[in-house]
Amino acid sequence: MRLFVAVLPPPTAVGELAQALEGLRDDRLRWTAEAGWHFTLAFLGEVRDEVLPELHARLARAAHRTAPFGLRLHGAGHFGDRALWVGAAGDLGAMRMLAERADAAARRAGVPMGQHHRYTPHLTLGRSRDIGRDHPHQGDGDGLRPYLDGLASFEGTAWQVGELSLVRSNLPTSGIPGEQPRYETVAAWPLEGRPEGSG
């Protein structure tokens, strides 16, 4: 099954972001569905069934070692002219540490992971229908400028991240243009570590 590890924003954060996008959404972008908004920590791709027990055990361990941390949706950014995203503020050090642990857990469980890059917390809002299709990360984002300007001052309410989620991505199968992937949380583990400097 096709899997990724994620932090899922709570309904209040999703609602605030949806409100901020009112008046900005148009048909120039393929907008992601609110039900699919998430911060990917590690993309695993197709994972063999026999790897799942070890993957679950290692992700549970990663969550157990990580303390809950504060996060909020904040500002906006882009990958070239191809993708528009909203960023995060708060304890980004803890978020990056959790991403590192999720990546390491998957590797040790036997999931073949791609090249490791520094983690950039982002929640994808929309993708260009045609700009930069051949070179997804090229371009200066000029085509996305109205959206970037509209979200530049966006600041969501802080929440406490208390869970690590393993999510299955069910790719569109109907062939209907614009059909979105369906996401299904297959497992989640509470963050149970102690904050730095406590006892």
Image (tube, rainbow, N blue to C red):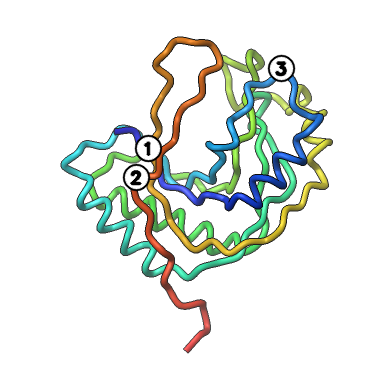
Q: CA distance from mark 2 to mark 1?
A: 6 Å
Relative depth, front residue between 12 and 152: 12
Relative depth, front residue between 22 and 58: 22
Question: Relative to residue 165, is residue 71 depicted above or below?
Answer: below
Give the quarter of the image for residue 20. top right
CB-based contact (under 8 Å), mark 2 and mark 1 = yes
Q: Few, some or many C-alpha atoms within 10 Å of disc 2 (few <14, some 14-19, many ≥20)?
A: few
Mark found first going from the N terminus, 3 or 1: 3
Residue on which disc 1 sits: 168
Q: Please provide percent x and percent y for residue 147.
A: 78, 31
Question: Relative to residue 183, is residue 198 depicted above or below?
Answer: below
Tell me the element at label 2: strand
Q: Please provide percent x and percent y for residue 45.
A: 35, 34
- Identify which amino acid the numbered label 3 is placed on: Asp
Q: Please provide percent x and percent y for residue 163.
A: 45, 59
Horizontal side of residue 112 vs 103, given as left or right: left
Mark found first going from the N terminus, 2 or 1: 1
Residue on which disc 2 sits: 186
- Identify which amino acid the numbered label 2 is placed on: Val
Q: CA distance from mark 2 to mark 3?
A: 32 Å
Q: Which mark is residue 27?
A: 3
Question: Relative to residue 102, is residue 46 depicted above or below?
Answer: above
